[in-house]
Image (spheres, rainbow, N blue to C red):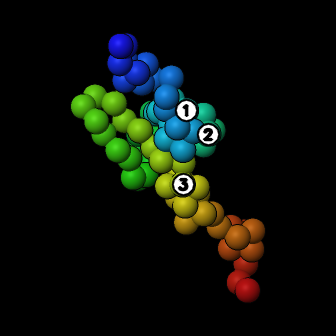
Amino acid sequence: MKNDLNNAPHCRTPDVLSRREAAKYLGVCLTTLDRLDIPKTRIRHRVMFKLDVLKKWIDDHTECAAKAMGRKK
């Protein structure tokens, strides 16, 4: 019987992104992604990002329009 683990890349869940996918999701290049302080998971040479972690990082680093323009509430 053939082992289904040999097909692991096809079994990836959409809640885990590769470096390239995470950079595309954020709209940045790979170099910029590497410089950002975003929690990541490393397994050997592979770097992966959990989608919920990326979404939380975006929320945590989003400024409201008034603050970004230097206005006080």
Circles 1 and 2: CB distance less than 8 Å? yes
Circles 1 and 3: CB distance less than 8 Å? no
| Residue underneath mark 2 | 25
Question: Where residue 10 appears, x then y in whole percent?
Answer: 51, 23
| Residue underneath mark 1 | 21
| Label 3 vs 2, first from the N-terminus | 2
Q: Residue placed at 49% from the left, 28% from the top?
A: 11
| Label 1 vs 3, first from the N-terminus | 1
Residue 19 in view here:
yes
Front in this rendered view, residue 30 or 5: 5
Work out which residue is located at the far front of the displayed protein and give it.
1
Residue 60, by quadrant, is: bottom right
Q: Is residue 59 left or right of residue 42?
A: right
Quadrant holding the N terminus: top left
| Residue underneath mark 3 | 52
**What amino acid is labelled 3 in the image?**
Asp
Residue 52, by quadrant, is: bottom right
SS of the residue under disc 1: helix
Quadrant holding the C terminus: bottom right
Q: CA distance from mark 1 to mark 3?
A: 14 Å
**What amino acid is labelled 2 in the image?**
Tyr
Q: Residue placed at 43% from the left, 52% from the top?
A: 38
Q: CA distance from mark 1 to mark 2?
A: 6 Å
Residue 11, numbered circle: none
Image vertical order of residue 56 relative to residue 8, above or below: below
Q: Residue placed at 45% from the left, 43% from the top?
A: 49
Front in this rendered view, residue 21 or 67: 21
SS of the residue under disc 3: helix
Q: CA distance from mark 3 to mark 2?
A: 12 Å
SS of the residue under disc 2: helix
How many C-alpha atoms fall within 10 Å of the one at disc 2: few (<14), some, or many (≥20)? Answer: few
